[in-house]
């Protein structure tokens, strides 16, 4: 499923070219053991279903909803957003190849905006660094695994205890999306904070699945 989630992120920035400059991704380090340790530290969520309470803000507007992710046994994901009273705001199917299809939608957004923005970001915990990622050292002492995929540079930032704390996406020297992750001992982040500069919105997702 890592391949599936990576493809969703590629779609997030289709048509954007360039790679992140050294000033943004730190200094490359040739340390195979350290790189392997960070690759091992990333864990795919081991849950049959993940639930998040989400608030998305763009300009003066705000949307509150509950979002659900269900990994499918045959690959891919079923994703839905609902209101507190159970009305469906959107339903999306992600196939094993990473292609998304909107099954239903009651939101003032295009299918593309929904799939390449909120849905792609919702699947962040299932999208780990590529096995070919390069190891970088950041000025604050943190470590990063950096990879380029279809003109998109992704930087997975780990703290000094090897916990995944951020995902940053770049085009050239231009930051596009920054996601911070807060953990509470489970395989699903307790909180995800998203700053999507490209689409000009912010979102906060709080896990409602318990300590998984």
Image (cartoon, rainbow, N blue to C red):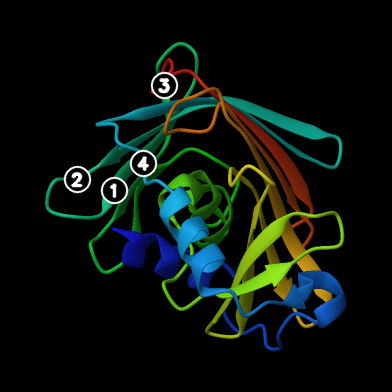
Position of the C terminus, as image quadrant, is top left
**Mark seen at residue 42:** none
Q: Gap between marks 2 and 1, in whole Å? A: 5 Å
**Mark seen at residue 72:** 2
Disc tally is 4
Q: Residues within 10 Å of mark 2 (few under 14, many from 20)?
A: some
Question: Residue 132, how many percent across, how many down?
Answer: 46, 78
Q: Residues within 10 Å of mark 4 (few under 14, many from 20)?
A: many
Are the two marked residues, 3 and 1, in contact with CB atoms closer than 8 angstroms?
no
Q: On the image, numbered disc 1 is attached to which residue?
A: 77
Instruction: Report whether 6 appears left or right of 94.
Output: right
Going by the picture, which residue comes out furthest to the bottom? 18
Question: Splitting the image into 4 quarters, where does residue 34 fall?
Answer: bottom right
Q: Gap between marks 3 and 1, in whole Å? A: 20 Å
Q: Residues within 10 Å of mark 1 (few under 14, many from 20)?
A: many
Position of the N terminus, as image quadrant, is bottom left
Element type where label 3 sits in the image: loop
Quick one: label 3 or label 1, which is nearer the N terminus? 1
> Which circle, 3 or 4, is nearer the viewer?
4
Are the two marked residues, 2 and 1, in contact with CB atoms closer than 8 angstroms?
yes
Instruction: Report whether 87 appears left or right of 29.
Output: left
> Which circle, 2 or 3, is nearer the viewer?
2
Element type where label 2 sits in the image: loop
Q: Determine the residue positioned at 52% across, 57% down.
A: 38
Are the two marked residues, 3 and 4, in contact with CB atoms closer than 8 angstroms?
no
Quick one: label 3 or label 4, which is nearer the N terminus? 4
Location of residue 166 with respect to 170 vertically, above or below = above
**Mark seen at residue 87:** 3
Question: Residue 123, how many percent across, how many down?
Answer: 45, 48
Q: On the image, numbered disc 4 is attached to which residue?
A: 79
């Amino acid at each position: 499923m890592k391949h599936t989630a990576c493809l969703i992120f590629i779609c997030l920035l289709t048509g954007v070219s360039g790679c992140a400059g050294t000033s943004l991704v730190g200094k490359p380090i040739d340390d195979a053991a350290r790189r392997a340790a960070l690759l091992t530290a990333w864990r795919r969520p081991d849950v049959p279903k993940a639930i998040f309470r989400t608030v998305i803000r763009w300009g003066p507007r705000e949307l509150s909803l509950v979002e659900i992710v269900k990994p499918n046994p045959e690959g891919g994901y079923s994703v839905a957003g609902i209101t507190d009273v159970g009305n469906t705001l959107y339903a999306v199917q992600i196939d094993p190849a990473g292609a998304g299809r909107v099954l239903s939608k009651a939101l003032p957004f295009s299918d593309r905006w929904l799939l390449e923005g909120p849905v792609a970001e919702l699947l962040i915990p299932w999208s780990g660094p590529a096995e070919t990622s390069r190891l970088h050292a950041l000025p604050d002492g943190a470590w990063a695994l950096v990879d380029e995929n279809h003109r998109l540079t992704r930087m997975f930032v780990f703290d000094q205890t090897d916990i995944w704390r951020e995902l940053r996406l770049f085009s050239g020297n231009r930051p596009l999306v920054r996601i911070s992750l807060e953990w509470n001992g489970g395989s699903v982040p307790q909180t995800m904070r998203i700053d999507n500069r490209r689409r000009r919105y912010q979102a906060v997702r709080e896990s409602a699945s318990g300590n998984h």
